Amino acid sequence: MVIVIVEDHPLFRQVLSDIVDSHDDLVLGGAFASAETCLAHLDGNPADVVVLDLNLPGMSGGELLAEMGRRDGAARCLVLSGDVAPDTVYEVVELGAAGVLSKAADRREVVRAIRTVAEGGTVLGDDTQAGLADQIRMRRAEPAVVLSERERRILELVAGGHTNEEIGREVHLSPATVKTHLRHVFDKLGAADRASAVAEGMRRGIIG
């Protein structure tokens, strides 16, 4: 099993490398301080598992997960993070992580998680499972928000940084009518302003 590590903290990166090197069935394919260098390596060097932190310089661990999900035959990902709050775990699982483990896990737990993920399994540490279940129940119970196609398009254009005048030209409406549509979008999303409306629209999957 070829394992790649993405961890910006030098000491923790070395500890993880040593853990992998100490097991005959695990081969260290590389240990990188950033998502960008990891992706460049993976372009010509396939791996079975990528063990990654979420808080990385430049491209975040979440962005790396999303990019890996767009690649055919990409390695499976195990998130090893200091942040295992339920909402974080939910989000990284939604992005395609095959496992989430706290950095407080011991060496045996880490090795077991790597092997499980490499073999096609899913790993959630004991300290994440109950919180994740609660998060899933809460989000499933969240009232659905339905935007019209025009409202959704206007929100997409707001996310792209366009002004009401520019949006009006794009969708063939007056700026005043765009403003009215935006008020309806804000009300439906429970948003106070353009930024929070975009964030809520992304969180709910209404816009990408």
Image: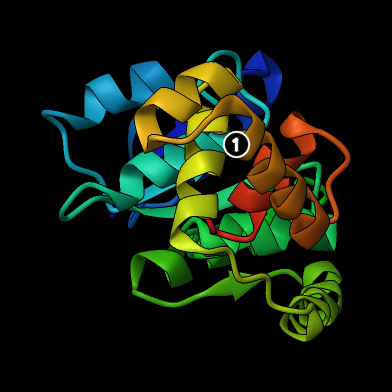
Report the front residue among 204 and 100: 204
Q: Residue at x 30, y 27 (%)?
A: 39
Question: Residue 77: percent from the left, percent from the top?
Answer: 44, 53
Q: Residue at x 36, y 64 (%)?
A: 118
Residue 179 in view: yes
| Residue located farthest toward the left when viewing the structure as drawn | 44
Report the front residue among 113 and 21: 113
Q: Residue at x 48, y 27 (%)?
A: 167
Q: Amino acid under label 1?
A: Val
User: Image check: 109 left or right of 18?
Assistant: right
| Up/down of 126 relative to 23, above or below | below
Question: Residue 86: percent from the left, percent from the top?
Answer: 82, 63
| Up/down of 4 relative to 84, above or below | above
Q: Residue at x 51, y 75 (%)?
A: 122
User: Image check: 162 left or right of 25?
Assistant: right
Disc 1 element: helix
Question: Residue 139: percent from the left, percent from the top?
Answer: 76, 75
